[in-house]
Image (cartoon, rainbow, N blue to C red):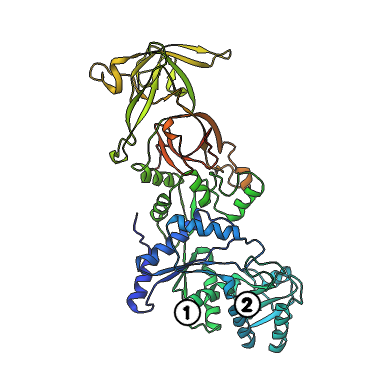
């Protein structure tokens, strides 16, 4: 695996060398309101790998302070995804674990005259806040006494007010050039069941108040977040300082990772699921970690992809092909290479003995002898790829089968197609051929050279299979860049074809990886059954991407 090396690592090294910190402690703080996607993988891998580089620690902390959209299902999914990626957190915490301590810090700010209860609604607060070019103006409730604010905040906690009827706001500076410092809301009222706390609380802290406190409670040294929180850092520091936290964490921002033709928004992914445009969060076309896993991407390929993209203070966009390339690099020497025919046409070898089946030796991976070998069946009837045959050879570059043109069936014999049968629409339904029994397993190459080397599956032992050929969910072009993302959906993102695989795959299990000879990398899908196997195409064998 590639070594992590970036500007934050340099900061950490300097902090250790100077004695600013004695140990590196990071955290990954997802909100459990959706499944993680590959954008989150960057945050996970960055936090864990940086801490590991210095023998430090990383906590998993669920930011469960907004119960309206949070669910235990997502908590379980996030824990599973982290383990699948190969990371074990030092501790697992929940933001809701700190509700009491956070509430006490809010009381502290009220007593210091740095927080007040406001009666303005959300629309009014936004209006009073001003713009980037105009200062905000004070709420008419900003100068309530400490005693009144304490009383009102306690009543908020006791459930005496409706949702949105009151908020608790920090008292900072409504004229600040940084809008985040214009008396931000720290608590709002939500009468809703919390997935862990039940109905114990009806006031919930906002992210910008809760997050720095949670970092301080846990002793986090380097709080890493995406660049969009750059102008929140001053508020982060304000909360830590004015709440008189014993431990002082520091926030550092890095650029977001965008991937071509890939949706990197939890909100958009939720829309796709709700609109039933996909099969669920684990649809193999989805960029969620569970979707990528189902499609066939390995944890190593994702880690190497993230580390290979680097980390900087600017947002970046990389080609989706780069992830495919990491998958190929990872599985090239690991994956078995069985035969599969995804668009079959039957070949009858007329001079081969009827009823005879022979078994031929075949390596499981021609580039890795340690994966051993297997026997593949051969008989009078085989399936080949329809695209591997054409009636008349078009030119010298055509290196596959044609009428009267000899080719080699990989690991088997030389055959020569002699005639075809067609349906009423002119489609080829059957190919007749002859074979040379003296050319078994490639013998005969020294006498003559066939016009190509194509794979096959023996017909009587072949197992029916469904192949799901996947493309990006969205296609972004210069012409559609201003359209809603739903209008960019690729109508060809899922193409299902039916074919056959060799009998060695009869016991395949979900998430088994294969390189199907000449067809690409595939993974067994969870929909697969004993009577009909299902495979997802992870990626093709070649890419235009150059590392």
Q: Which residue is mark 1?
A: 248
Judge whether 506 appears above or below 418 on screen. Answer: below
Confirm or deny contact between disc 2 and disc 1 (CB under 8 A). Answer: no
Residue shown at the point (60%, 61%) measured from the top left? 72
Q: Local crowd at mark 1 within 10 Å, few (<14), some, or many (≥20)?
A: some
Estimate the x, y position of residue 173 in percent, counting from the top left. 62, 79
Judge whether 469 appears above or below 451 on screen. Answer: below
Q: Quadrant of residue 447?
A: top left
Q: Local crowd at mark 2 within 10 Å, few (<14), some, or many (≥20)?
A: some
Is residue 194 shown to the viewer in this render? yes
Residue shown at the point (57%, 75%) measured from the top left? 98
Q: Nearer the viewer, mark 2 or mark 1?
A: 1
Query: In the visual, does 383 lie left or right of 526?
Result: left
Residue at the front extreme, as displayed: 355
**Circle on res. 175:** 2
Question: Whole-Å distance between the Cαs marked 2 and 1?
Answer: 27 Å
Residue at the left extreme, as displayed: 446
**Circle on res. 359:** none
Residue shown at the point (58%, 79%) measured from the top left? 101
């Amino acid at each position: 695996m590639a070594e992590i090396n970036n500007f934050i690592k340099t900061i950490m090294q300097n902090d250790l060398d100077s004695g600013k910190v004695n140990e590196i402690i990071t955290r990954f703080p997802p909100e459990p309101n959706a499944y993680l996607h590959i954008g989150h993988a960057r945050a996970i891998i960055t936090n864990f790998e940086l801490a590991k580089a210095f023998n430090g620690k990383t906590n998993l902390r669920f930011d469960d302070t907004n119960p309206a959209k949070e669910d235990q299902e997502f908590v379980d999914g996030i824990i599973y995804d982290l383990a699948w990626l190969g990371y074990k957190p030092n501790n697992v915490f929940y933001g809701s674990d700190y509700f009491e301590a956070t509430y006490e810090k809010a009381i502290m700010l009220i007593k210091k005259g740095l927080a007040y209860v406001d009666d303005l609604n959300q629309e009014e607060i936004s209006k009073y806040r001003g713009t980037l070019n105009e200062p905000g103006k004070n709420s008419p409730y900003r100068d309530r006494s400490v005693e009144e604010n304490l009383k009102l905040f306690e009543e908020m906690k006791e459930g005496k007010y409706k949702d949105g009827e009151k908020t608790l706001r920090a008292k900072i500076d409504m004229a600040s050039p940084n809008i985040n410092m214009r008396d931000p809301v720290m608590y709002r009222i939500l009468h809703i069941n919390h997935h862990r706390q039940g109905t114990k609380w009806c006031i919930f802290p906002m992210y910008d108040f809760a997050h720095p406190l949670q970092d301080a409670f846990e002793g986090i040294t380097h709080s890493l977040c995406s660049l969009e929180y750059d102008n929140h850092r001053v508020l982060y520091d304000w909360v830590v300082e004015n709440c008189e936290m014993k431990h002082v964490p520091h926030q550092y921002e890095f650029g977001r990772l965008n991937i071509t033709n890939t949706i990197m928004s939890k909100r958009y992914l939720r829309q796709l699921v709700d609109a039933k445009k996909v099969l669920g969060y684990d649809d193999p076309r989805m960029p969620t970690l569970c979707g990528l896993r189902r499609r066939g991407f390995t944890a190593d390929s994702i880690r190497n992809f993230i580390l290979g993209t680097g980390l900087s203070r600017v947002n970046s966009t990389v080609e989706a092909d780069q992830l495919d390339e990491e998958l190929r690099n990872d599985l090239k020497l690991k994956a078995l290479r069985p035969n599969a025919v995804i668009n079959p046409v039957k070949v009858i070898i007329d001079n081969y003995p009827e009823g005879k089946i022979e078994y031929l030796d075949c390596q499981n991976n021609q580039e890795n002898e340690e994966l051993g070998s297997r026997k593949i069946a051969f008989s009078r009837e085989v399936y080949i790829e329809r695209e591997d045959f054409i009636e008349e050879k078009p030119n010298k570059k055509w290196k596959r089968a044609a009428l009267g043109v000899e080719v080699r069936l990989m690991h088997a014999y030389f055959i020569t197609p002699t005639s075809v049968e067609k349906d009423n629409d002119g489609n080829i339904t059957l190919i007749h051929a002859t074979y040379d029994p003296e050319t078994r397993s490639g013998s005969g190459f020294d006498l003559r050279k066939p016009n190509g080397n194509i794979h096959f599956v023996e017909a009587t032992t072949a197992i029916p299979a469904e192949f799901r050929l996947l493309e990006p969910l969205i296609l972004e072009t210069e012409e559609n860049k201003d359209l809603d993302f739903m209008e960019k959906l690729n109508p060809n993102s899922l193409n299902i074809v039916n074919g056959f695989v060799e009998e060695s795959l009869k016991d395949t299990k979900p998430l088994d990886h294969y390189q199907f000879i000449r067809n690409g990398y595939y993974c067994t899908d969870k929909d697969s059954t004993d009577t009909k196997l299902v495979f997802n195409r992870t990626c093709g064998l070649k890419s235009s991407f150059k590392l």
